[in-house]
Amino acid sequence: MSTNQPESLVTVYSTPVEFDAEIVKAMLADVEIPSSVENANGPFPGIGAVPCQVMVPVEHEAAARKLVEEHEERLRLREGRDTDEYIYDDAEDGRDLV
């Protein structure tokens, strides 16, 4: 039995827009959750021919899903607002746009 088996990965986010997947990947990296984007559209970014999947090791699945759900909720809240309105997070300066 080989000890060099790849980690078990699970999909925590799927989108046809590679840029959105990269945002989620960066968000996960900010809290030190390793992730990768699979099925990126290569030389044709933004086309969405194949959905991009953000994958994380199975041991980080619960924390990653929670962060993705919070991110999607912020997006839903922002969609209902004017572009001049801000949704603030709880950063120290209180001026971070979410």
Image: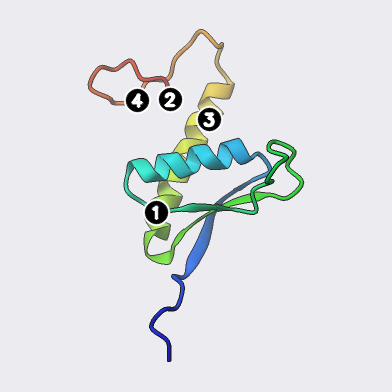
Which residue is the site of mark 2? 98
Element carrying mark 1: loop
Q: Label 1 sits on what residue type?
A: Pro
On screen, 89 above or below 67?
Answer: above
Earlier-in-chain disc, 3 versus 2: 3
Gap between marks 2 and 4 measured at Cα = 6 Å
Farthest residue, direction left = 92
Secondary element under disc 3, as helix, strand or loop, is: helix
Q: Amino acid at mark 4?
A: Asp
Helix, strand or loop at mark 2: loop
Reading the image, the residue beneath label 1 is: 34
Q: Is there CB contact under 8 Å for labels 4 and 3? A: no
Is 13 situated above or below 88?
below
* Quadrant occupied by the C terminus: top left
Q: Are marks 2 and 4 in contact (CB under 8 Å)?
A: yes
Q: Residue pushed farthest top? A: 84
Gap in angstroms between the C-alphas marked 3 and 2: 8 Å
Give the colour scheme shown.
rainbow
Rounded to the nearest whole Å, what is the CA distance between mark 4 and mark 1? Answer: 23 Å
Relative height, residue 13 to residue 89 (above, below): below
The location of residue 7, given as percent across then percent down, is: 44, 70
Which residue is tagged 4?
Answer: 89
